[in-house]
Amino acid sequence: MDITAASGRTLVDSRGSSCPGPITDLAMAYRRAKVGDTIELWATDPGVKPDVQAWAAKTRNEIVSIEDQPDKIVAVLRILRR
Amino acid sequence: MKRVVIVGGGSGATFLANALDRRRFEVIVLAKSASHMFQPALLYVAFKGAGPTGIVRDERSLLPRHVHFIHEPVSRIDLPARTVTTAAGSWYDYDALVVATGVTTDPSQIPGLAEIDGQFGNYHSTIACARKVWAGLDAFRGGTIVLGQTSPVIKCPPSPVEGILLAEELLRRRGLRDKTRLVFISPYPRPYPAKPMNEIVEPLLRERGVEIMTFFDVDRIDLETRTIYSIEGDEVEYDLPILIPPFVGADIAYEPADVLDANRFLKADKESLRIKGFDDAFAIGDATNLPTSKAGVGAHLEAKVVAGILDGGPAKFRGRTHCAVDLAYGMGTFVIGSYTAPVLKYPPSRLNHFMKMMMAHIYWLSLRGTLDPVFDWYFARTDPDRRSTARAA
């Protein structure tokens, strides 16, 4: 996992990490996040989609988008609660 | 003759020091401890009250005679200058460096956890800490036990499930099960992180009456009210907490500092195991940030890969995991996967449990590479990539 953080936006690169790596990486980024921050998660494991949806529902944070791109899945989350 | 400096004195370091050809390499092992512990045994110290016999050996006794073993903690590694400096001020240069420093528990990351850890112990660090877990369980007469990992990053991913199942077995055998509420907390979406294995684990937990709280990433612990709070907004009260602290990499200063991630794990190439940006430096075992389980089998296989590369071969690590899981009541399973093959749903059996128990006996022999032909045959036979390909066909 690589995490790059700048001015309230954190990029979490979990490509190549299989279940539950991406959700683990997301949880680690959430631990360091503040309300109002955005987390962008990159993953290649298709299991990331239901896991991110369940995570957002549980933590009551907002999924801005989840997109299938040719080489990765990109989930963008806005932190509403922390 | 090339000089290989190995930093660390655990499984990965010992496997590698034994695997390197004495005719081609001068090998120096620098370790902060003179003792070597078979870490999986802590589970049985904590949950069965097992004694310390056979768990620890002198590291020197596990290394070939030609290896220079130096019992000094390393304080600094300068990768561009190819030097390793110890806390005592000695320094060593190298042709190749292999870092196998493992991880340590860091309860200070979570408010209240250091106090819990000091009083109730844990089963991921020392024999003394594992004995505290046993002392708590042995004295327990009823109430709520909360068990789980406090952070998403963990050494030995099956160990939380093993702990709760062994605690359940102990309490049932002692006639205390009806007086006990067992709560399993997990930061993941399900009790076992990998879905296929969860299909085995979650029904077992439910069948044995364990309450499950998922997405429970511990934020803080209120010691007065004996309540654990999660970042996700949940809380649970405890009478006996058995909590696995967060893990961090070794306290060594690196040049450049950015070879470490936020948890002090070394950024390494997942196949060549080279520390990012350096052709002559490798990281193996728990010390890395590789996207695979932190487990002894990884350290073993990664040590073989590095030995192969240093020997001039085309070796690559494929992310193989093969972790034995104790499901209590004499049953066991294995977590088997790789970078490219998802974890298998491996049916529980008494044979699997027997094999896990056998590992405690053959571990010391395996460190020397004596059993490599057996392991090579066994790992090939259970290769998850081959099984995935066969299923797809």
Image (cartoon, grey):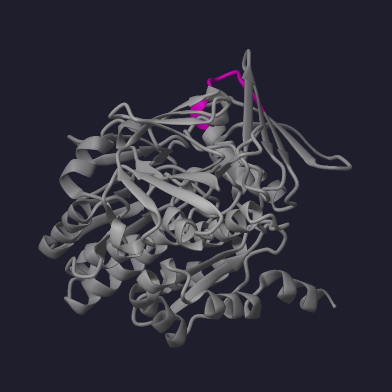
Give how far across and how far down residue B223 sits, in percent: 20, 36
Residue drawn 79% across the image and 73% down it: B389
Q: Is residue A38 magenta?
A: yes
Residue drawn 23% across the image and 43% down it: B117
Q: Is residue B136 magenta?
A: no
Count of all numbered marks drawn on residues in the image: 0
Q: Outermost residue toward the top?
A: A7
| Residues rendered magenta in the picture | A30-39
Q: Nearer the viewer, residue B251 or B46?
A: B251
Residue B73 visible in the snapshot? yes
Give how far across and how far down residue B343 sits, in percent: 62, 65
**B380 up-or-down from B117: above or below:** below
Relative placement, left or right, of B28 versus B238 is right
Residue B208 visible in the snapshot? no
Give how far across and how far down residue B195 sits, in percent: 61, 62
**A31 up-or-down from B218: above or below:** above
Give how far across and how far down residue B391 sits, in percent: 78, 77
Query: Residue B76 sits in which quadrant?
Result: top left
Q: Outermost residue toward the right?
A: A70
Residue drawn 46% across the image and 81% down it: B352
Q: Nearer the viewer, residue B377 or A8?
A: B377
Residue drawn 75% across the image and 52% down it: A46
